Amino acid sequence: MGGKKWMKGWGTGSRPRLRRIMRCLRSGEHLRADEMVPSSESLATRDYSASGYSSRAGESEHKPDNSNIEEAESSLRESGCLNYEEARALLGRLEYQKGNVEAALHVFDGIDIAAVTPKMKLCIARRGNARRGERRKRPSQNDDAPLMSMHAVSLLFEAIFLKAKSLQALGRYREAAQSCKVILDTVESALPEGLPENFGTDCKLQETLNKAVELLPELWKLAGNPHEAISSYRRALLHHWNLDTETTARIQKQFAIFLLYAGTDASPPNLRYQVEGSFVPRNNIEEAVLLLMILLRSSALKRIEWDPSIIDHLCYGLSVSGALRGLAGQVEELLPGVFDRKERYYILSLCYYGEGDDVVALNLLRKLLSKTENPNCIQALLLASKICGENPDLTEEGVDCARRALAGLQGGCDQMGSAANHLLGVSLSAQARSAVSDSERITKQSEALKALETAERTMKERDPTIIYHLSLENADQRKLDAALYYAKQLLKLEAGSNVKGWILLARILSAHKWFPDAETVVDAALDQTGKWSQGELLRTKAKLQIAQGQLINAVETFSHLLAILQVQNKISGVQKNLLKGSGSHDRNLELEIWHDLAKVYISMSQWRDAEVCLSKSKAIALHSASGWHTTGLLYKAKGLHKEALKAFTSALNVEAAYVPSLVSTANILRRQGTSQSMTVARSFLTEALRLDRTNSSAWYNLGMLYKDKAKGGDAASLLEATECFEAADLLEESEPVEPFR
């Protein structure tokens, strides 16, 4: 009767009456009997005015929000009543809108969510079935229960959502997440297959659901529970929530960012439905990259607005996973106008450089640095200088790019200036090594050292790479004290974390002929280095043992290293391919170790063992300059000079600039004693010294050639021989067990 009387009286005077109800709810006044809201439990029985959170008398005259009145009207029209929970929801929303977060939370806490959840589920399920056009099932006891209206469900969902927002504002993140999760659990339980289209278009339910789905993972992150956050992100994206495109894109982006940078290992997603042959990400990086590529595709199809940060995060994800060629493909597929052409050139050049395709990278940089594009782009100039400095044929261009970068900076940025001077020093050093005349070589070496010192002096923070090249350049110029100083600084700066620093220090100590100290350094490095990274260190240790005459120990060290490499080669999967090209480096190292071991056996006159080592190396690379050279040394040790000469010639056919074979070939030709052979030998030695001015063996053999020539009474040749022997002796005194570079 109460409900019928209410509906009968609902008319032109309903709006003032409803405003009166809302004012009473806020102030705590009791309603007259004819204005009371029909409910199984009247609000008057739970007097809110006793809580202390009700509005003050002056505030009770404020005009309520019209949206609240309209929401209540909708609920009243459908059900004919406004129950206690709905009234709490409206009042809590008013308090939240006014910024009274604690008061709003107090009101929301009065809603018995557990009691109304079954009714909400039933209402949502029936609405979903109706939207799908499904036939009603046989009546059950629940069907006889009074249905909650969709507007009431929407109102209660909003109350639960605002409760979560209130808890978030108060820093109670875990409780906020648990409150927000109720909304998703309710909908998912009522509609396991997802929401049908246009499910909640006639109320605010869909809008509240969108907000809750997006908020939940953020709350778990704030609560310090990354695994729940990841689970919530996946739930948001895999369940059919009817999210709009922009909301889905925001969730995908935030999830990708969290996977990339949160530092939490996520287990692979457990998909309920999976198409056979579809890609399932195995780790954080793969999942993040997949999400970012989906966003990139959506942007290309104009479904969402272009977001430049997507490509930035994708660059990071694909870079750390070593998929730079894949990144280049994604950038190249972007439509014109979406991405700035100059930035496209630069990113592509970085990708191809990272993949080892220096020619393509340099050509892209040349396009970028052309007059029609951006000839003064500092970053492009620095990258071009770096690429050119690593190629002996392009050192002049590298020097030019570094100097252009310095001119463009004009002293404006010390850090960039330090980088430019560093690259200038590296390029000048490479130029010095290929210089034809001594005067040019000395000039370039001086300029290189000056540029590197300037880079070290102007760097904002100590850069290990600059210190390393300073030590290396000083060592190359046989300034061993300065080289040792910088090598120790490098080791201290990197805290022994880089194998290159340890090896450089050991080589400098070996150049001082402090072999025990160098071996101690290597042993210390081995203690701090993982087994799979010990290859170069063990090789250096074996070379130090050879220098000390400990040939048996050297054989044992080489054998130990070969065992490690062979086990490492059998390992498949991710561990073997952590870095692009690591497999190729390991095979090259194994090849050189077999040759080193063969040379030890040759020095011990163990021909059979040496031949076994050479056969093992040929199984890795049938034709290599080092392999043919070692074969030539074996023939020479056996006294088979003709076969040795053929082997050295084969080495030069494989690599014309292979210095050891140039010297060995000249040595055999010199022993033949003919005028023609002496001339050819001299040309070989001259070429060897052009390629490596610090090769003591080349200087010694050139001195022997001049000495043989001086036997005919040529005083000038005798003087030349003396100078060559002096140079050979000086270089041998400071020669490391392995070349510094």
Image (tube, helix red, strand yellow):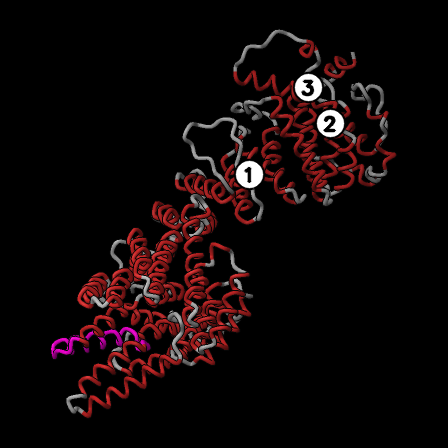
From the viewer's perspective, is 28 left or right of 617?
right
From the viewer's perspective, is 337 left or right of 175?
left
Q: Nearer the viewer, residue 131 or 626?
A: 626
Quadrant of the rendering where the C terminus is positioned: bottom left
The percent coordinates of residue 253 (x first, y second) are 51, 43
Label whose residue precedes the other's in the sequence (2 or 3): 2
Mark in the foreground, 2 or 3 = 2
Amino acid marked by disc 2? Ile
Q: Is residue 97 visible?
A: no
Amino acid marked by disc 3? Met
Residue marked by disc 1:
267
Which quarter of the figure has residue 703? bottom left
Residue drawn at x 59%, y 36% as measured from the top left: 231
The magenta stretch spans residue 684: yes
The magenta stretch spans residue 687: yes
Q: Is residue 99 above or below residue 677?
A: above
Q: Is residue 305 visible?
A: yes
Residue marked by disc 3:
148
